[in-house]
Image (spheres, helix red, strand yellow):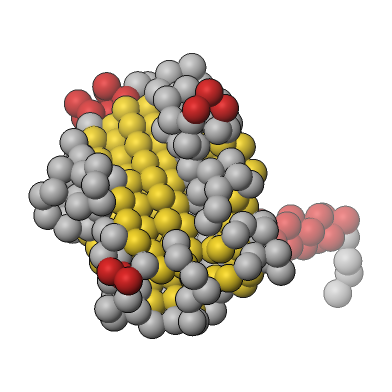
Amino acid sequence: MRITWRLVLGFLAVSVLALLAALARPSWPQGRGAAAPTAALTTGKGTERCTLRAATPREAARRAKPGDTVCFDGDLSRRRLVITRGGNREHPITYAGGGDAVDGITIEADDVIVDGFRSVRPEAPGIELTGHRVTVRNNTVIGPRGGDGDGIRFFGDDLAIAHNTVRGTDNGHGRHADCMQTFASDTPPSHRVRIENNRCEDIDNMCLMAEGPDDGEGDGHGTTGDFTIRGNHCETLRASQALMFEDVRNATITGNEFATPTHHAIGLALRSTGARVDGNTLHPGIRYEVGIDASSRPGYRGPEPGGLP
């Protein structure tokens, strides 16, 4: 057969069309049972799926529904993020920061997840949460100022505080600037609290101060208990101990790193019974791991205490 330029050009055109068709095919598997990937609306700053975008917390409180993930379009760097709208037990509302700056966070709602916000020199406490079934995760608080200087305060039941960083609390001007704190005076006692994989860095006072309603300063109503303190990094600079429990039942304290030379790592006092301590890593300058009083001995499981709290 005689080959002409017209045949050559025709062959090339067919080849190009075949190649373009191949490139245009979907990359997911074809055939029975195969599903195409679903689209996700993202913030552009992370992997959060945003189902609602709002300019302000007030707009979010008005529009958010159970199960929503709220992302903010407005600049919140000079205002405190106040969350008053929650979901329900099966479908919490997630407030996704994606690294956004806010001037502190206040949560007054149930069934809420607050994820990925950053606060530099907010009014203390940097994060304050009051509610049930609240999760605070992946947030950063640096240099909280004023008040008692705390990084995070929490009140309520079924709380999770995980993968947060608090840095640079300051005991100046008579403060007791803890990384985290709870008490039960004009606030509700707390139950079933998980504090896991957080970093408390450059903390003047304690990494955790937990006080129940009968610690002498509380209101005497109810109990505080069932805390899990696991996998946290703790740098306490000025206090005698890193963790202190007063009138807190059933604290489990495992796998934490106490990175600075406090007198002892953990204090258990005023009927803080049922504590379990295991697998923590101690700075060599810590004199003993656990200090305990006689009222807290019932149900204790852990290393032999070295003295009083």
Q: Position of residue 180 (x, y in %)?
A: 43, 46
* Residue at 55% over, 71% down: 289
Q: Nearer the viewer, residue 221 or 77?
A: 221
Q: Is residue 196 left or right of residue 185?
A: right
* Residue at 35% over, 79% down: 300
Q: Image quadrant for the N terminus?
A: bottom right
Q: Image quadrant for the C terminus?
A: bottom left
Say if 281 sits above or below 150 in the image.
below
Q: Is residue 301 left or right of residue 177?
A: left
Q: Position of residue 233 (x, y in %)?
A: 58, 59
Q: Position of residue 37 (x, y in %)?
A: 44, 61
Q: Is residue 154 left or right of residue 186?
A: right
> Outermost residue toward the top?
78
Q: Nearer the viewer, residue 133 or 218?
A: 218
Say if 67 sits above or below 54 in the image.
below
Which picture quadrant has residue 96?
top left
Q: Quick check: can you spot residue 64?
A: no
> Outermost residue toward the left?
221
Q: Nearer the viewer, residue 56 or 12?
A: 56
* Residue at 51% over, 48% down: 206
* Residue at 54% over, 79% down: 279
Q: Position of residue 161 (x, y in %)?
A: 40, 53
Q: Quick check: can you spot residue 61?
A: yes
